[in-house]
Amino acid sequence: MGARVIAAASSQEKVDLCLKHGADAGLVYGRGPFDREGQKRLSEQFKQACGPHGADVIYDAVGGDYAEPALRSIAWEGKYLVVGFAAGEIPKIPLNLALLKGCDIVGVFWGGWVAKNPKLHAASVAELLDLYAKGKIRPYVSERFPLAQGADAIRRLASRQAMGKVVVTMD
């Protein structure tokens, strides 16, 4: 869709997978928790990856100690999408960053949006299926588990070992 995508992940293996599947660049952010100096180094990594303009959109599904350094790399009037908190902790963002960057911090609660916008959701699903049918998007499924091993699939996700989509199948 014309975006330059920079993947940030906790391991080189995960970054390499993102690059293989279309990311333009990537960086390994390491594992937190980060002290103030560690957050500053991480912010510099993000800024270097994004370039002098900064990131127009940040999709943050991790949160925790990664959120503030990511927000510091955002472009003027960028959009910071709060998608989840895989790192476990809900970050405390200094709101002066939103003021200084003129950026929007947007909560993306998919379940709530679907409940409030069923027609828009149906249109979005139709668009995604069309993109999939045309081969423009291909979700990467790294592992499949039979329903009887569903708990193993959840443990794989919880341990942050999953390298793509984890699918539970039913016979």
Image (tube, rainbow, N blue to C red):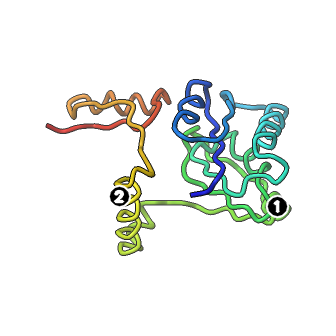
Q: Check the picture and name the quadrant holding the C terminus.
A: top left
What residue is disc 2 on?
129
Q: Nearer the viewer, mark 1 or mark 2?
A: 2
Q: Nearer the viewer, residue 38 or 6?
A: 6
| Circle 2 SS class | helix
Instruction: Relative to 83, say whether 86 is above or below.
Output: above
Q: Residues within 10 Å of mark 2 (few under 14, many from 20)?
A: some
Q: Which one is earlier in the sequence, the residue at label 1 or at label 2?
A: 1
Q: Position of residue 46 (x, y in %)?
A: 76, 41
What numbered label is drawn on residue 51? Answer: none
Query: 130 or 140, which lies in front?
Result: 130
Which residue is pictured at 69% across the width and 33% down the height? 27
Residue farthest along the front direction in this orientation: 134
Q: x, y percentage for residue 70?
A: 73, 46
Q: Residue furthest left?
A: 171
The CA distance from mark 1 to mark 2 is 35 Å
Instruction: Look at 40% across and 66% down and name the residue there.
Output: 114
| Crowding at mark 1 (Cα within 10 Å: few <14, some 14-19, many 20+) | some
Q: Measured from the top left, where is residue 88 in percent x and y?
A: 56, 39
Seen from the viewer's position, the closer of residues 8 and 109 is 8
- In the image, is 63 to the left or to the right of 154? right
> According to the image, label 1 marks what residue?
101
SS at badge 1: helix
x, y percentage for residue 167?
Answer: 32, 38
Q: Is residue 134 above or below residue 116?
A: above
Quarter residue 33 falls in: top right
Q: Answer above or below: position of 163 versus 128.
A: above
Residue type at tag 1: Lys
Q: Is residue 126 left or right of residue 75?
A: left
Q: Amino acid at mark 2?
A: Leu
